[in-house]
Amino acid sequence: MLSNIRFTLVETSHPGNIGGVARAMKCMGLHSLALVAPKVFPDPDAVSRAAGAEDLLTGAYVFSDIKQAIADCVFVVGTTARPRAIEWPVLTPGIAAGRILAESRNGPVAVLFGRERSGLTNKEVERCNLLVRIPTTEDYASLNLACAAQILAYELYLRSGLPNPADPPGQAQADSASMDQFHRHLEQALHDLNFIKVDPPTKLMRKLTRFFNRAQPSQEELNIFRGILSAAQAAARRDKKGS
Ligand code: SAH
């Protein structure tokens, strides 16, 4: 879905900002960059700010007007620092990202970023299906173009279903049958350890089930837990024999 999302920069003045946007995009798995009548492009400043994202610059589509740039898009989103006189739906980046991803299933989606000085014109805004505004203090709402692009790219990445670095790498999630076996094992172990004194211990087991479902353990983590339960059961058996 990210491949259908095209960040489209309108009449950017500073080539360094184009490089900054390319870098912001690449880190977040976005690769489609379009430039509408850039003041200076290509330019060494763009390359130096892109750092490792030069491939996005060489692959950028360059258009002479916005109409051509969005002609094939099924959905157009405008980003704007200031509230507009005309009433247009304005969302925060996270909510907008969900909508953009959903629309990108149907075809290319353009996310427009305006000129450094004056943003998008009202005519350009009128081409948009919705607007996104990054919440800021009232005093100063205007982020640097590449910083605004970074926030949008990040929110898209978070919701795109790409691997989340917070997930343990390469571990298969425990399936429902394994979770069932685990819960049965846990209940039996709690009996063996004399932790459960009422029968049936419905409420307690439901709370423990809720806890383990929330944790979404991997198969490996579940095996470790089952090993701990078996060791505790064996110790309890030894205790009983000894007494
Ligand atoms: N004075 C301009 C600011 C231009 S900043 C304006 O009123 O819009 C250049 C571009 O960065 C903007 O056109 C927009 O695409 C993006 N941008 C900057 N700050 C933003 C914010 N708070 N929310 C959404 N986009 C923003």
Image: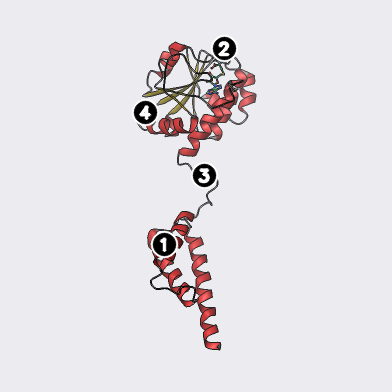
Spatial CA span between label 1 and label 4: 44 Å
Secondary element at image label 2: loop
Question: Which quarter of the rendering shows the C terminus?
Answer: bottom right
When the figure is inspected, residue 154 is found, relative to residue 237, above or below; the finding is above
Choose the circle earlier in sequence order: 4 or 3. Answer: 4
Mark 4 crowd level (few <14, some 14–19, many ≥20, 10 Å Cα)? some
Q: Which quarter is ligand 1 in?
A: top right
When the figure is inspected, residue 242 is found, relative to residue 111, above or below; the finding is below
Where is residue 126 shown, x and y percent of the image?
41, 15
Choose the circle earlier in sequence order: 1 or 4. Answer: 4
Beta carbon of the mark 2 residue lies under 8 A of ligand 1: no
For the residues carrying marks 1 and 3, which lies nearer the camera in this image? 1
Residue flagged by tag 1: what amino acid is it?
A: Arg
Residue flagged by tag 3: what amino acid is it?
A: Asn
Spatial CA span between label 2 and label 1: 63 Å
Spatial CA span between label 2 and label 4: 29 Å
Residue 107 shows which numbered tag?
Answer: 4
Beta carbon of the mark 3 residue lies under 8 A of ligand 1: no
Mark 3 crowd level (few <14, some 14–19, many ≥20, 10 Å Cα)? few
Question: Which quarter of the rendering shows the N terminus?
Answer: top left
Mark 2 crowd level (few <14, some 14–19, many ≥20, 10 Å Cα)? few
The residue positioned 63% from the left and 25% from the top of the image is: 49
Quickly name the residue at label 1: 206
Q: Quadrant of residue 68?
A: top left
Residue furthest out toward the front: 198
For the residues carrying marks 1 and 4, which lies nearer the camera in this image? 1
Tell me, yes or no, whether the two marked residues, 3 and 2, touch with CB atoms within 8 Å: no
Quickly name the residue at label 2: 39
Residue furthest out toward the left: 106
Instruction: Indicate left or right for 122 with 141 as reference.
Output: left
Tell me, yes or no, whether the two marked residues, 1 and 4, touch with CB atoms within 8 Å: no
The residue positioned 55% from the left and 24% from the top of the image is: 57
